[in-house]
Image: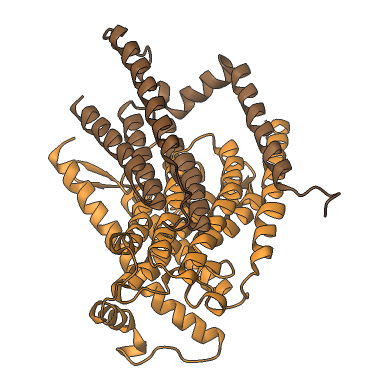
Amino acid sequence: MNTFYFIAFLSIFFSILVISAKNPVHSILYLVLTFFTFTIQYILLNAQFLAIVNFIVYMGAILVLFLYTLMLMNLNKDSEPFKSNIVKIAAVLGGGCLFVVLFACFRQVGIAEPVVLKDPGLGLVKNLGKVLFNEFLLPFEISSLLLLSAMVGAVLLATKDPKTV
Amino acid sequence: MELADIIIKFVLIVIIFAISLVVAMYSTYAERKVAAFFQDRIGPNRAGPWGILQPLADGGKMFLKEEIIPTNASAFLFIAGPSLAILTACIGSAVIPWGQHLTIGSHVIDLQVTDINVGVLYIFGVVSLGVYGVMIGGWASNNKYSLLGAIRAASQNISYEISMGLSIIALLMLTGTLSLREIAEQQHGFWSHGWFTWNVFRQPLGFLIFIVCAFAETNRTPFDLPECETELVGGYHTEYSSMKLGFYLFAEYINMFISSAVMATLYFGGYNFPFMHHLGLTENWVTILGVIALFAKIIFFIFFFMWVRWTIPRFRYDQLMDLGWKILIPLAIANIVLTGVIGTIFK
């Protein structure tokens, strides 16, 4: 349990650094560390497959692409878009409203009973596969369709219109 | 876990670590000798007999050179880049089964640091993390050539990871497990039930895709565009000197060693060799011979890496992307379908 609190503290610490870092590339690197702490949390929960998939997909692929894009964009202080004061005030108001809503929500929340899994080995590949392909087959397949449509959409956006070429 | 077990694991880790470093050191020597052989030269022959002390001389030079951190570079990330590269290169060896098990007295020692049940994915994760060392170093140098090298490394790694993953999926459909130990056990011996047991004979196309992707992931010629010296001076390590450069070069050789070990384990039977239980030897001798067999396979693959490097010229960038996205990915998907169909027919 103590490990949990320590790792949770690290997650929050790094995620605050993500939004407070001046340099966008540093932000992404802190985000990598944040995701790494999530991986550790999954391992603590004995969800090995989820941990390693989080590791490969988020740290190994998505954030590499983020970093790639940021490096290409060459964000310097000079080229940083000008933010007017009105935008800043609006952002503070919006954030304050969100805080009030969240605070109101969390006041109502009591401490829940800790969830006890029926099968502690649920996160292992074999069990996870059986659950996904038996009990949750339909949602699983539908989510794959969702990803496919996103891919097709991305390709469509990226390809040039043949008429304009 | 008893104290004895912890000590055994610790010793095993130290030995594997030392072996990776020694193999990487002598790979640099072997690379130069192989290159010399291919180009009809003699190669390094001054330090020690046949030049075998050359890696030590190189290492000494690397350590003693002046360390330069460019003024406009971000110093922390500039140092973090090569450190991360060598770290990710070294942690891959944790899940590779180096042999069966040795019995010494009452202790049974598994020649593997840890047998996690997602071993293949662990290797895959470490490989996908490897690109950060190159990217961070290239970006932190604050040099356009380095940045271009870093960007090339990122796009190349991401592109070839996809087909590598797809080729592994076809393999997993056969093995039904993600544990490298179990995959190695399934390829026991060499011949059973009228067919070869090694996966390369069951997944020839998958192996071909995997080895091409392994070349791309280790940034070896013909895929060494991140450090393409004809266009980018030195690519991502243009600004590096002394041991920080040494770490980048070293990481490449360790990666080569680890990916050779992974290929040998996944497709070439790992520590298994023909007639392993028909020679009438004790368990321990079979294990030791198995370790030697695995290292013979690894050394063959390392030689193959060098053979290709000194034979084939570098790809052009668009050719690299075409090969990755338009040839390897459709081939890998076809391989999955083929494996599924054949698996269902011969069930």
Task: Reply above or below: B83 against B58.
Answer: above
Q: Is residue B339 above or below residue B288?
A: above
Q: Colour of chain A?
A: brown
Quarter that holds the N terminus of chain A = top left
Q: How many numbered marks are there?
A: 0
**Which quarter of the figure has residue B333?**
top right
Q: Which residue is located at x 25 percent, y 52 percent? A: B12
Of residue B135 and residue B289, the one placed in the foreground of this image is B135
Q: Quadrant of residue A8?
A: top left
Q: Residue at x 49, y 52 (%)?
A: A70
A138 vs B65, left or right, is right
Q: Position of residue B25 (x, y in %)?
A: 34, 72
Q: Which chain is orange?
A: B
Residue shown at 29% from the left, 59% from the top: B17
* Most foreground residue, A51 or B229: B229
Between B37 and A22, which is closer to the camera in this rendering? A22
Q: Give the image location of residue A97, x and y in percent.
A: 38, 20
Q: Residue furthest right?
A: A163
The percent coordinates of residue B86 (x first, y second) are: 34, 61
* Residue B158 in sight from this viewpoint: yes
* Residue at the image point whose x is 68% and y is 63% from the top: B318
Is residue B273 visible in the rendered image? The answer is no
Colour pattern of the rendering:
by chain
Q: In the picture provided, is B298 more to the left or to the right than A92? A: right
Query: Residue A20: x, y in percent?
Result: 32, 42
Q: Nearer the viewer, residue B123 or B53?
A: B123
Quadrant where the C terminus of chain A is found in the figure: bottom right
For residue A91, side relative to residue B54 (left or right): right
